[in-house]
Image (cartoon, rainbow, N blue to C red):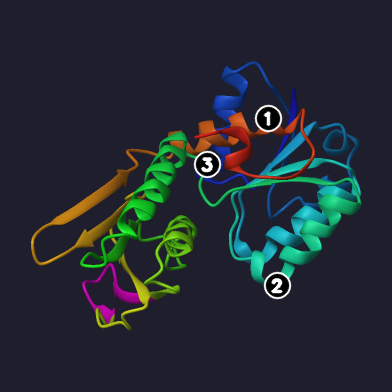
Amino acid sequence: MKIALIGYGKMGKMIEQIALSRGHEIVSIIDVDNQEEFESEAFASADVAIEFTAPHVAYANYLKAFAKHVKVVSGSTGWMKDHGDDVRRMCSEEGQTLFWASNFSVGVAIFSAVNRYLAKIMNAFPQYDVSMEETHHVHKLDHPSGTAITLAEEITASLDRKDDWTVGTLLNPDGSLEGSRESAPDKLRIDCVRRGEVPGIHSICYDSEADSITITHDAHSRKGFALGAVLAAEYTATHRGLLTISDMFHF
């Protein structure tokens, strides 16, 4: 399979290594300093482009890839609110293909399935309040993480007593604390921590007077995310439309 890489930071380089080890060919690498590569024959020859960039440029990257009829796998977040309808239209009516996920880790996909199942169970036990904490490296600027938001939306879809999520506290790398742990009863609080080089930890806790139940996904490295992105590209090469993890994994 011919793969183009859009974004060549730590994640892009790791995706490259895994793609090559699985027998794929990297035909084009695009970063901030060579945007003209979008117009190249090499980019247009790609079966799939894997895009990991900043939220503010992701949508524009999709448009450039779609203009060359190149399918896209993307882990960039933050574009859905303003451009989600356009992307859905392009995928459903104009023959374009985007595989999007807030997290490509196979472990997170399994964790997400457990999260959905647990939320359905806990809907019958209102004595348990639920909250979430996500921890990431100091270079991550957005909070909460896209994965935390996805997990929260899965919970609120099944838990009648929570109609939305809200940001609680943010523990900064310098130890300063912003926000509050106080939240409305119908809101799922997400607390955020930024420290060290943590790839990503997500913990969901159901707490009652009697006991608590906590599930956690702790990423040891970015390798799981990169492998998942390549697996998604392999899936996308033979599928069309707006795709996501639930299309690839049926838990």
Q: Residue at x 78, y 57 (%)?
A: 88
Which of the pair 18/35 is nearer the observer?
18
Tag 2: amino acid = Asp
Q: Which image quarter holds the N terminus?
A: top right
Q: Residues within 10 Å of mark 1 (few under 14, many from 20)?
A: some
Residue 227: give x, y in percent of width and height: 52, 31
How far apart in space, not on screen, are marks 1 and 3 (Cα)? Answer: 13 Å
Which of the pair 170/164 is nearer the observer?
164
Kindly state the secondary structure of the residue where label 1 is placed: helix
Kindly identify which residue carries mark 2: 82
Q: Is residue 79 magenta?
A: no
Q: Is residue 199 above or below residue 192?
A: above
Q: Is residue 106 above or below residue 56?
A: above
Kindly identify which residue carries mark 3: 104
Q: Residue furthest front?
A: 124
How far apart in space, not on screen, are marks 1 and 2 (Cα)? Answer: 27 Å
Q: Residues within 10 Å of mark 3 (few under 14, many from 20)?
A: many
Image mark for residue 235: 1
Sequence-first disc among 3 and 2: 2
Kindly state the secondary structure of the residue where label 2 is placed: helix
